[in-house]
Image (cartoon, rainbow, N blue to C red):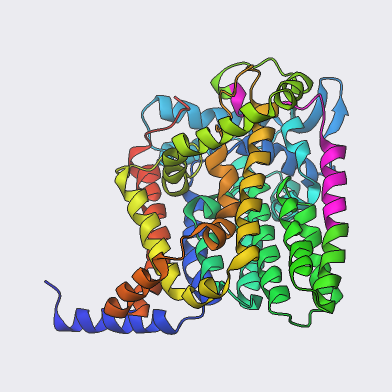
Amino acid sequence: MWSEGGIQIAVLGLGTLRKMAPQRLLVAVGLPLGLLISLLSPAWTGYDEFTHFARVVDMAHGNLEPGSEPEGTGSVIPVAHRDATAQIILDHQAGRAPWTVTSIRGLLGHRPDGRVVFIDTRPTSASTPVAYLPAALGSLLPVALDAPGIVVLWAGRVASLLAYLALAWWAIRSAAAFRWSLTAAALVPLNLALAASVSPDGFTVAAVLMAVSLWTRVEADETISVPSLVLPMLLLALAKPPYFLILGLFPLSAGLDWSRMRVRAALIAGGALAVGLANTLARSSENYQAATTTMIRQIEYQPSVQRDRLLGDLPGFVWATVDTWISEYRFYVQGWFRQLGFWEADLPSVVPWLLAGLVLVSLLALDGDDLRSFRGARRGLMGGGVGLLLMAIYAASYVYFTDLSDYGHVGLQMARYSAPLAILAFVSWTPRILGPVADSIVGRVGRRWAVAAVAGVPMVAVGASVVTWLWTGANTPLG
């Protein structure tokens, strides 16, 4: 049982949480958890992380795009970095947890010695150098000093995390509505893991948060300077496609309720949409090779054939995406809370559902007024837009991640690809009837408990992953 002093400390802590601004809670929770992920997540076991790492190392050497080499299109990096990735696999096969003394010593022993190797980084060409810039800047010094690959990786991860938190902090602080929803979306464990890895995905999530924050300000008819309109939209246009389509919110806002500020935002968003579309088309390639699917089985890469199959059976594709989302949604929920890279946390499968429900109830209370005021055509069109964007992601997955004539593997990466849409899905898909239920619950337990839940859910999920990484080293496909 708790002592009286312990209870008083807990009450004081909850009182502090209740008064804490959402952007401060983001930093208070996201920074330590993000650093744990950055430094303790097994090396190169983030999603496709070694391929992204090779691109970042190449950028740190001054090459913004994968180059044409005798072996093909890709990046040239030190042999030691490739050899270090084998150490993680050997450790797992030997039954060692990732961060034993033997494992760390082995990783630090792989230092560049002048030998180089070609790495196929075509999978990274879908994203612009902008999405890799934080990791590349963080890697400049260790790359220049010929540091071991693990040190370069840590530096890139930490720099990516800090950039993510800075952009998310700005988004939450400047938002005119849904500030707690933005905070919870930024702290979704999978989003936080993407931000704390060498990947363009974390930057993309942050760009989505910035765009949604800007949209709330436009909806509130605030006076916003042109640079403040251009920067978030341009960052999203240059992030990982097809998330730039979210910029369609701004023309929608102007069409439903005309004002000078809304029209200005819509025009700028239209330009950014054009940039995003042109960038996507320019980077689409018949020579692109997906990295992840080849870990499961070898595929015969044929995007033109897959596009023809998809366009020839659009009703079947639409039905397949809806069916896949419904039938596989339970796997996505697990992925958002347990699958922080290739390592899967040892949590009972019911726990992610409980955590998701807890966050939902908390946000219904914390952002209840904003949710109640967001209704009608705006809400319906946003909800439909999220559904269409998910279909676009499913289509890209079908074209680039499978060679099957049916829609097998179409949802392979959907947990990761749908995570950036968490904020929009919550705002537009949450049943309004749940509002009074949440008010009743919070009326009994207090608002501070809702804030504590937003902070506590990612702590539980990331904590379970840390335990897995440090002690068990289990549940990974690398073996």
What's the magenta region? 272-294
Query: Viewer-proximal residue, 467 or 91?
Result: 467
Query: Viewer-proximal residue, 151 or 367?
Result: 367
Query: Viewer-proximal residue, 375 or 114?
Result: 375
For the stretch drawn in magenta, what is the main secondary structure?
A: helix
Occupied quadrant, residue 2: bottom left
What is the quadrant of the C terminus in the image? top left
The count of marks equals 0
Occupied quadrant, residue 458: bottom left
Q: Residue extending furthest left? A: 1
- Above or below: residue 283 compared with residue 426: above
Task: Note whether residue 232 is visible.
Answer: no
For image coordinates 78% across by 33% down, the residue present is: 75
- Above or below: residue 112 compared with residue 402: below
Residue 196 vs residue 282: left or right?
Answer: left
**In the rendering, at what x and y percent does residue 296 appear?**
54, 21
Task: Note whether residue 132 is visible.
Answer: yes
Occupied quadrant, residue 424: bottom right
Query: Viewer-proximal residue, 56 or 281?
Result: 281
Residue 57 vs residue 192: left or right?
Answer: right
For image coordinates 86% across by 33% down, the residue present is: 67
**In the rendering, at what x and y percent does residue 93 appear?**
41, 24
**In the rendering, at what x and y percent does residue 314 appear?**
69, 29
Q: Is residue 374 magenta?
A: no
For image coordinates 75% across by 57% down, the residue present is: 248
What is the quadrant of the N terminus in the image? bottom left
**In the rendering, at what x and y percent does residue 475 appear?**
38, 33
